Image (cartoon, helix red, strand yellow):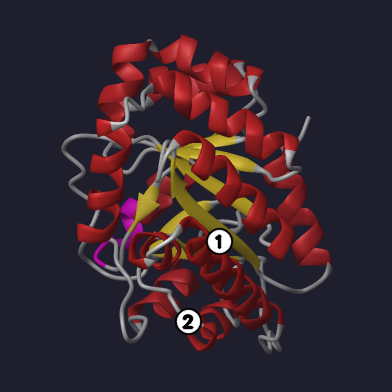
Amino acid sequence: MKTKLEELFVRTRAENRAALIAYLPAGFPSQSLCESAISILADAGIDAIEIGFPYSDPVMDGPTIQRAAEMALKGGTGAKEVFTSVKYAHEANLPTVVMTYWNPIERYGVDAFAQELAKNGGSGVITPDLTIEESDGWINATRNSDVNSIFVVAPSTTNERLQKVTQKCSGFVYAASLMGVTGARASVSSGAQDLVARIRKLSDLPVAVGLGVSTRAQAREVAKFADGVIVGSAFIKVLLDASTAEEGRDNLTGLARDLVAGVREADRTGVSTLK
């Protein structure tokens, strides 16, 4: 049985387009406003969503996501709120994954976390700090619960390592566009396209690119060669910068529609998703 995430990529591949995946931390700016933001993103036409599990030591996250995570943690966000957000997004008909560091999964219980995710309609989990050498128990848990295990690779990842990591992935491969932390940037690294090309030689899985995409032009550029375009900091920033909740909603709507348009207008001539 395919997850909703896997079904999404079957559909977008048939339509010869990339999927736009949004990232939001659970409990940001509050639990109710997080759910409001999920609804806005769904209405604007995004294809899937990552729900971030706020963590006190986010080594992969830049200042924007760190600030949002701190707000969520101060508001009392924990596993319960993460799974509530997953369920809300699932009921909004969005394929939903959780982005989390390993410690919260281990603390919750490996099998229990996978089971609770599936129970609430989640499709998979991105674990940026879990090495494949230590992943067997987690992969067994995700397979038993029919959810996807998604790992992160970077431009520095060797071809030998890429092959090992992609064999452990399901759903999609998360390709970090550059070395460094999350955050909106003026341009997306040229290394992203090279990394996607290297992955394609080793795996038939969809490849989604994250880190740095914040504008329509950048989304269009990445969508020319990737199966998914992941945007997080840009969405969070418009909510952080808004002086009122209404302004935040309006700006989030505008950015989401702009990015959806960018992804869908990409020229994907010559894109191959096969080995």
Which of the marked residues, 1 or 2, is nearer the chain's N terminus? 2
Q: Are marks 1 and 2 in contact (CB under 8 Å)?
A: no
Residue at 35%, 21% in the rendered image:
105
- Tell whether 42 sits left or right of 61: right
Quadrant of the image containing the N terminus: top right
Q: Which residue occupies 39% across, 75% down? A: 192
Q: Is residue 78 above or below residue 127?
A: above
Residue annotated with mark 2: 215
Q: Residues within 10 Å of mark 2 (few under 14, many from 20)?
A: many
Question: Front-most of 246 and 44?
Answer: 246
Q: Residue at x 45, y 63 (%)?
A: 235
Rendering quarter of residue 73: top left
Amino acid, disc 1: Arg
In the rendered image, residue 215, in percent from the top left (x then y), is placed at 47, 81
Question: Can residue 160 be found in the magenta stretch?
Answer: yes
Residue 190 x %, y %: 36, 85
Instruction: Give the percent coordinates (x, y) of residue 269.
Output: 71, 89
C-alpha separation, residue under disc 1 versus residue under disc 2: 18 Å
Q: Is residue 68 left or right of residue 27?
A: left
- In the image, residue 191 above or below residue 145: below
Question: In this orientation, which residue lies closer to the viewer: 79 or 156?
Answer: 79
Reading the image, the residue beneath label 1 is 249
Does residue 199 belong to the magenta stretch? Answer: no
Please identify the quadrant where the C terminus is shown: bottom right
Residue 85 is left or right of residue 76, and the answer is right
In-image side of 133 versus 120 (left or right): left
Q: Which residues are magenta?
A: 156-161
Q: Nearer the viewer, residue 73 or 118?
A: 73
Q: Nearer the viewer, mark 1 or mark 2?
A: 1
